[in-house]
Image (tube, helix red, strand yellow):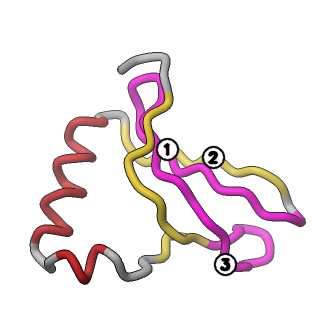
Amino acid sequence: MKGMMNLIRKTKSVCPECFKMIDAFIVEEHGKVYMNKECDKHGKFKLLLSFHPRYYKDLDEFYFSLFGKEEKEKKFYVL
């Protein structure tokens, strides 16, 4: 899906400047996986997570399959 943005999942993260808890979105864009997040005070941040979207999504699915549905719905934080 090169050239388009595809939401993989929503999560929580922190602003790297003030460490405030903020919403984050794991997305596939231009053949890579990014975390997009925005702090009201410090603006937008885009963090490259993987150069391999298929492997990232497979690993993400495998990781959460180990814990069951209730664990996937809990909040996980990525700095």
Residue linked to disc 2? 46
Q: Image height check: is 1 above or below 47?
A: above
Q: Residue at x 73, y 79 (%)?
A: 20
Q: Give coordinates of residue 28: x percent, y percent.
A: 42, 36
Residue linked to disc 3? 21
Q: Image height check: is 64 above or below 10?
A: below
Q: Secondary structure at mark 1?
A: strand
Estimate the spatial distance between the alpha carbons at disc 3 and disc 1, rounded to whole Å.
18 Å
Q: Residue at x 35, y 21 (%)?
A: 1
Q: Give coordinates of residue 64: x percent, y percent.
A: 20, 69
Q: Which quadrant holds the C terminus?
A: bottom right
Q: Secondary structure at mark 2?
A: strand
Residue linked to disc 1? 34
Q: Image height check: is 20 above or below 45?
A: below
Q: Image height check: is 75 above or below 46?
A: below
Tell me if mark 1 has few (under 14), some (14-19) or many (20+) residues whose alpha carbon lies within 10 angstroms of its own.
Answer: many
Q: Is 41 on the left-hand or right-hand side of 3?
A: right
Q: Looking at numbered disc 1 in the image, what kind of residue is underneath it? A: Tyr
The magenta stretch spans which residues? Answer: 14-41
Q: Secondary structure at mark 3?
A: strand
Q: Are marks 2 and 3 in contact (CB under 8 Å)?
A: no
Q: Are marks 1 and 2 in contact (CB under 8 Å)?
A: yes
Q: Looking at numbered disc 3 in the image, what kind of residue is underneath it? A: Met
Q: Residue at x 53, y 51 (%)?
A: 35
State how many labels appear. Answer: 3
Earlier in the chain: of badge 2 and badge 3, it is 3
